[in-house]
Image: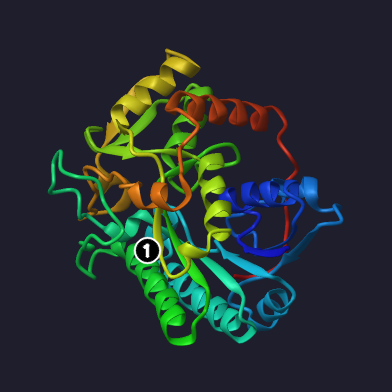
Amino acid sequence: MKYLITGGAGFIGSHLTDRLIEQGHHVHVLDNLSTGRLGNVRHWVDHSRCTLTIGSVLDNHTLGQCIAECDRVVHLAAAVGVERIMDRPVDTILTNVRGTENVLELARHHHKKTLVASTSEVYGKAMSKNGGGPSLGETDDLTLGATTKRRWAYACSKAMDEFLAQAYHDEHDLPILCVRFFNTVGPRQSGNYGMVVPSFVERALAGKPLEVHGDGTQTRCFVHVADAVRAVTQLLDTPAAEGEVFNVGRPEEISIQALAERIRALVDPDPSITHVPHEKVYGEGFEDMQRRVPDLSKLEATIGYEQQHSMDEILHDVIDDVKTRQTNVPAPERVNGSL
């Protein structure tokens, strides 16, 4: 089978590329390398079952050619990372909404099964008021902040992606499914865009203080990218998943303070841990969530999903990856092109 992966040179996309090619499939990677890296898929570039196109989901001509030639589409291309979202709100909205609209319309035209990547961000601050309350399920209400808060543009754009996907399924009978990724972590992830685990690891290895935003009591749930990718491939092969939305994550919580302490202990006990107000990093009025825990019962019932990687395994894999990348620093990649 031939897969098109938009954003295929990105963190999750490159791991999905690995898995699909190893399973015997052909993968066409489409990526504009705005946040993805050629190095993530370089080991497949000369492989007979891999095709790489440097291009954008906003370019309908290129996108249309790619979709016409594939059997399935995995749409991962998006503007990601809190820092990028806060710095480039127009880019975030246009890429996430218009790009997904392009993918869905062309997939409808060619009638290609499509998986649309969403995010736990769509829940907004639904859990921040719940204290030790229940985990978040796919049919729970979303609680988003005011439109004057730039922080919520990403959540709104991905929620609209889900609405579009469902509309194409209901109105045009397009075989489609959505996955909401919860804090996916692992090798190849960069800390450049505010991703907390690689950011802490990179700073710890450099002997710099680990900067915890806020008081550190906020909790998150992290899942290994290998577990997330396995869920994606199984969902794509499950007819009952079509027309549905699924949480993909790991339900065990850890506070950001405890995360920093654990990474410091694993890497080097010398770096200090400092606390920086959210406002100093992201501007006045920034809103964060105290808790966000996925309910995985729907995923478990549909594909028998079980996560295979513990938090310590996740951290060890990231630490080993960052050490390797720091030892083997590649030459800068220069690619002409726009989003």
Q: What residue type is labelled 1?
A: Tyr
Q: Where is residue 53 in the image (x, y as percent from the top left)?
A: 74, 66
The picture quadrant where one finds residue 119 is bottom left
The answer to whether residue 35 is above or below residue 91 is above
Q: Which of 216 and 48 is in front in this view?
A: 48
Helix, strand or loop at label 1? It is helix
Q: Where is residue 172 in the image (x, y as percent from the top left)?
A: 49, 86
Q: Residue sitting at 29 percent across and 44 percent down?
A: 293
Horizontal side, residue 322 vs residue 207: left or right: right
Q: Mark 1 points at which residue?
A: 154
Q: Nearer the viewer, residue 31 or 337?
A: 31
Q: Position of residue 155 (x, y in %)?
A: 34, 63
The picture quadrant where one finds residue 124 is bottom left
Q: Nearer the viewer, residue 124 or 252?
A: 252
Horizontal side, residue 215 vs residue 167: left or right: left
Q: Position of residue 66 (x, y in %)?
A: 71, 74
* Label 1 neighbour load within 10 Å: few <14, some 14-19, many 20+: many
Residue 248 in view (yes/no): no
